[in-house]
Image: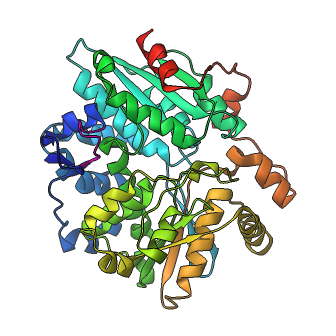
């Protein structure tokens, strides 16, 4: 499989090169040159397949022969070492719980898959790679966990000071070993801009920088797995399927659309955002006009210029009319989010967190247009990671899962920076 830059001013590269480079030399995101739909028989028999076999069939064409089949299957097995259950929240509405992994966030899937691919590619090399990643919340912890102790890889994580939860911060600042955390005086977009600038800085070529954000294809591609897993569980209802993704950098919903291009029968997608509403405004006006991000209680979605939206546009040939048939996007504020949290708990005893609540709101709204459909939203993190908001809103006390308890007593270690020059000096040192 070859990958090309969406800026179309860089050479095509292999899967390995795309993973290691992260971003193309022309600043573009890599995208697969071909997308071949899976056979109809795959979907007809999907209930009989294990999650590992489903994932292998979904991703093997994008890896090609660059990782042997037995090794790719082993990588997938290690990636998917936890469950992806659907919880019925109310009639025709389900929550796809993506928080049963080691850091209790959906990003465990992509981070674990990418770290193992990179370890395979580095196994017989003397060189080191530096994984440079910006996080608005859960990416940092998932990447730190996924890459901890991986041979030949150093990890540097940038996060916005005061804009991630205490648990999220602990998950990325307490591990040590090959993991370093930089606390940035700014918002997530500032962190992401620094990362992108570093990739294009020739002075840092010796660091062999790559990204573990969803701009990296090995982080992004496996996010399509859980759409297949949900379909496997919901197929028995024999109803059209609407999917709502709480959306910040748009990696999840972009992966879902890729799954649809592979033949997965999804009738409609909803990108549910908080007040960072660049994409909902785009669908209203046809004008893509990114703005600086605003802080909300669903902080992992505080993104003003979502990186993966260009990949979605590519899959629809930048045709807005074609895109709108499959896709809607709605924005909700913090107060609406809290009301949704209370509604799910008071009426159905379901405990969600702010990001899942935004997804729930978008799904409820879109199902009004599809009364014959069934739907699910992504519950992207465990409620404990946003315990202050959840406990205050629902007037409850959450129990602490063992995955979280293990980091609570560890010392947080981070380096504070304000500018790109400070990042560059840190990397050089």
Residue at 43% from the left image edge and 78% from the top image edge = 241
Residue at 26% from the left image edge and 57% from the top image edge = 58
The C terminus appears in which quarter of the rendering? top left
Residue 88 appears in view: no
Q: Nearer the viewer, residue 160 or 200?
A: 200
Q: In the image, is 148 to the left or to the right of 116?
A: right
User: Is 120 located above or below residue 262 in the figure?
Assistant: above
| Residue that protrudes farthest toward the bottom in the picture | 371
Q: Nearer the viewer, residue 393 or 226?
A: 393
Q: Nearer the viewer, residue 316 or 362?
A: 316
Picture colour scheme: rainbow
Q: Nearer the viewer, residue 344 or 254?
A: 254
Q: In the image, is 115 to the left or to the right of 84?
A: left
Location of residue 68 (image quadrant)? top left
| Residue that protrudes farthest toward the top in the picture | 429
Q: Position of residue 44 (x, y in %)?
A: 26, 75
Which stretch is magenta? 23-30
Residue at 66% from the left image edge and 33% from the top image edge = 161
Residue at 42% from the left image edge and 28% from the top image edge = 132
Q: Position of residue 11 (x, y in %)?
A: 12, 40
User: Is 186 located above or below residue 122 in the figure?
Assistant: below
Q: Position of residue 273 (x, y in %)?
A: 57, 63
Residue 51 appears in view: yes
């Amino acid at each position: 499989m070859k990958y090309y830059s969406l800026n179309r001013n860089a050479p095509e590269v292999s899967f390995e090169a795309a993973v290691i480079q992260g971003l193309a030399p022309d600043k573009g995101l890599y995208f697969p040159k071909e997308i071949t739909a899976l056979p109809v028989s795959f979907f007809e028999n999907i209930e009989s397949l294990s999650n590992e076999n489903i994932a292998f069939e979904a991703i093997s064409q994008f890896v090609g022969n660059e990782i042997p089949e037995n090794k790719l299957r082993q990588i997938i097995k290690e990636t998917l070492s936890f469950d992806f259950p659907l919880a019925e929240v109310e009639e025709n509405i389900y929550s796809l719980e993506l928080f049963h992994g080691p850091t209790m966030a959906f990003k465990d899937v992509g981070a674990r898959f990418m770290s193992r691919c990179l370890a395979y590619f580095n196994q017989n090399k003397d060189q080191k790679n530096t994984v440079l990643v910006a996080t608005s919340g859960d990416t940092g912890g998932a990447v730190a966990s996924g890459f901890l102790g991986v041979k030949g890889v150093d990890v540097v994580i940038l996060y916005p000071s005061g804009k991630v939860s205490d648990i999220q911060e602990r998950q990325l600042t307490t591990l040590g070993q090959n993991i370093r955390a930089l606390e940035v005086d700014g918002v997530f977009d500032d962190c992401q801009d620094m990362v992108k600038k570093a990739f294009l800085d020739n002075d840092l070529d010796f660091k062999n920088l790559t990204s573990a954000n969803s701009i990296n294809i090995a982080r992004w591609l496996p996010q399509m797995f859980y759409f297949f897993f949900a379909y496997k569980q919901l197929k028995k209802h024999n109803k059209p399927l609407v999917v709502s993704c709480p959306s910040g950098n748009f990696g999840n919903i972009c992966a879902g659309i890729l799954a649809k291009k592979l033949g997965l029968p999804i009738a409609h997608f909803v990108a549910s955002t908080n007040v960072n509403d660049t994409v909902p405004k785009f669908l209203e006006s046809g004008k893509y006009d990114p703005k600086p991000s605003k802080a909300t209680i669903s902080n992992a979605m505080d993104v003003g210029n979502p990186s993966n939206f260009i990949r979605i546009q590519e899959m629809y040939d930048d045709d807005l009319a074609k895109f709108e048939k499959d896709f809607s996007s709605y924005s909700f504020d913090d107060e609406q989010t809290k009301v949704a949290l209370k509604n799910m708990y008071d009426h159905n005893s379901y405990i969600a967190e702010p990001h899942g609540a935004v997804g729930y709101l978008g799904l409820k709204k879109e199902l009004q247009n599809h009364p014959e459909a069934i739907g699910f939203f992504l519950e992207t993190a465990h409620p404990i990671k946003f315990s202050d908001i959840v406990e205050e809103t629902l007037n409850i006390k959450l129990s602490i899962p063992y995955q979280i308890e293990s980091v609570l007593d560890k010392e947080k270690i981070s380096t504070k920076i304000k500018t790109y020059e400070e990042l560059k000096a840190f990397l050089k040192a």
